[in-house]
Amino acid sequence: MVESHIAKTLEDALKTLNSGKFRIVAGGTDMLIQNRSHTGMPIGYKDNVVYINLINELDYIKEDEDNVYIGATTRLETILKSENAPKILKNIIHEMAGPGIRHTATLAGNIANASPAGDSLVGLYVLDASIKCQSVDNTRIVKIKDFIQGVRKIDLKSNEMITEVMIPKYDFSRFVFKKVAPRLSDAISKLSFVGAIRIEDNEVKDLRMALGAVYMTVLRKEDIESKYIGQSIGELKNNIELIIEDYNSFIKPIDDQRSNKEYRKQVALNLIKDFIMKS
Ligand SMILES: Cc1cc2nc3c(=O)[nH]c(=O)nc-3n(C[C@H](O)[C@H](O)[C@H](O)COP(=O)(O)OP(=O)(O)OC[C@H]3O[C@@H](n4cnc5c(N)ncnc54)[C@H](O)[C@@H]3O)c2cc1C
């Protein structure tokens, strides 16, 4: 028989995770779908579960001079309404699910679910977010690009949980988020894109682009981005065909029920081109 435990404090959750094999349920919006019964029977979790969504001490958005810190039980809707959450992230969350799901779902849950189509991830990759993982006897901080290791694969031990998402503050001259989906809300992305650029005195000082659902994890190529930093904006635009060529071989989407690989690849390249040419 599976055991379920409702943790009210972080200490309680960490002790529970340390006492045996437990799955974590935060908002449950992915967990309920993944464990739904197709025979009309109630949800059937196969493993023990620890519910963490009542842990108030992890429900916060704080900031200091350098970073914004979002606790693991903070709901997407809270982030959307917050004044100090990064604008890129708020734009993304605005297009995630609908209000009902956003009032329940967490950012940490979207990260831990590690879907290539997880919308917040493109923004968090571009913003160089880090994930705080805690167990009863250890705390470590991992960059999101290292934390997510593949489709639904994350760098998290069985006795650990995400307690916080740390997002450095950046100033960009321009950023865009594009979600390609069949309708405006309550739709999983066919693919997604975030581009961010900082231009000073006509020179590219910072350039970042990330694509979702075109590879096993979010695709961000810092080595390609850095080639174009220091160029004038005119030079950057003149190099558009080279930039497209740079990304072409790394974009490796799959066919699934939402789209096919040819469409995903072409639209991904179009989004890169559109972002650069309108910068
Ligand atoms: C109708 C609907 C629409 C949706 N639309 C979108 C959309 O537009 N874009 C999108 O990206 N997603 C969407 N989703 C998916 C889902 O809502 C998000 O991924 C959400 O952010 C998950 O958060 P949660 O708190 O509900 O996670 P849960 O379902 O509770 O957990 C998800 C996974 O994360 C793990 N987990 C949760 N919290 C922690 C933690 N603190 N530490 C370690 N592991 C943890 C769980 O064990 C589980 O593996 C949608 C879902 C539904 C049902």
Image (cartoon, rainbow, N blue to C red):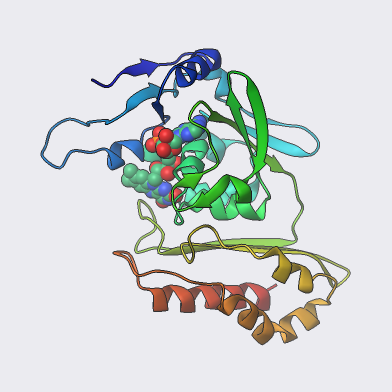
Residue at 18% from the left image edge and 38% from the top image edge: 37
> Image quadrant of residue 264?
bottom left
Residue 159: horizontal and vertical position, in percent?
Answer: 51, 26
Q: In the displayed structure, would residue 56 be above or below residue 199?
A: above
Residue 179 in view here: no
> Image quadrant of residue 221?
bottom right
* The N terminus sits in image quarter: top left
Q: In the displayed structure, would residue 6 be above or below residue 148?
A: above
Q: Quadrant of ligand 1?
A: top left
| Left or right of residue 217, residue 142 in this image | right
Residue at 67% from the left image edge and 51% from the top image edge: 127
Residue at 64% from the left image edge and 24% from the top image edge: 138
Q: Nearer the viewer, residue 177 or 262?
A: 262
Residue 94: horizontal and vertical position, in percent?
Answer: 49, 48
Q: Farthest residue toward the right?
A: 201
Residue at 50% from the left image edge and 47% from the top image edge: 93
Residue 254: horizontal and vertical position, in percent?
Answer: 39, 69
| Left or right of residue 103, residue 211 in this image | right
Residue 66 in view here: yes
